[in-house]
Image (cartoon, grey):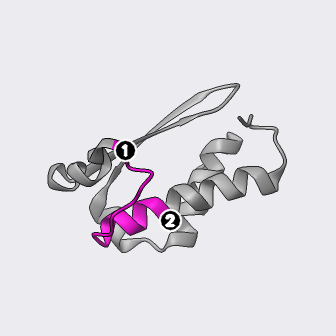
């Protein structure tokens, strides 16, 4: 299990895996990590709900499948990594 202060390579590996799973499901592929098929079933609802459990926090991401489709796997991984590290986008 990781924390927001875990080594970057560990967090990046987890974020890359989450992005890979989302993109695979969006393409209609069978994913063994989708136990019970809940993520695949959420395609019809239009929104995926992904929970990321970490030692120091729990992150719940609601992301539209249209956004997953329009976004590249690397960009999704970067977004998830930012959430895991606790980074926030600031508007000036």
In front: label 1 or label 2: 1
- The residue carrying mark 2 is 20
Extent of the magenta region: 20-35
Q: Secondary structure at mark 2?
A: helix
Q: Nearer the viewer, residue 64 or 17?
A: 17
Residue located at (52% from left, 55% from top): 18
Residue 74 highlighted magenta (yes or no): no
Instruction: Return the mark for residue 35.
Output: 1
Q: Residues within 10 Å of mark 1 (few under 14, many from 20)?
A: few
Residue 34 highlighted magenta (yes or no): yes
Q: Nearer the viewer, residue 38 or 12?
A: 38
20 to the left or right of 16: left
- Residue 74's image quarter? bottom right
Residue 92 at least partly seen = no
Residue located at (32% from left, 66% from top): 26
Q: Residues within 10 Å of mark 2 (few under 14, many from 20)?
A: some
Residue located at (31% from left, 49% from top): 39
87 to the left or right of 66: right
- Residue 22's image quarter? bottom left
Of the two numbered discs 1 and 2 on the same chain, state the one appearing first in sequence. 2
Residue 71, position as x, y percentages in the image: 43, 71
Residue 62, position as x, y percentages in the image: 37, 43
* 45 up-or-down from 28: above or below: above
Residue located at (74% from left, 37% from top): 4
- Residue 16's image quarter? bottom right
**Which image quadrant: the N terminus?**
top right
* 75 up-or-down from 53: above or below: below
Farthest residue, direction right: 7
Residue 44, position as x, y percentages in the image: 15, 54
């Amino acid at each position: 299990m990781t924390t927001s202060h875990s080594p970057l390579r560990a967090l990046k590996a987890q974020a890359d895996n989450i992005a890979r799973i989302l993109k695979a499901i969006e393409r209609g592929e069978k994913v063994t990590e989708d136990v019970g098929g809940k993520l695949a079933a959420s395609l019809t609802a239009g929104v995926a709900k992904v929970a990321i459990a970490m030692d120091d926090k729990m992150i719940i991401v609601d992301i539209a499948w249209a956004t997953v489709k329009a976004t590249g796997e690397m960009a999704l991984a970067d977004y998830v990594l930012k959430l895991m590290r606790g980074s926030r986008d600031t508007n000036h």
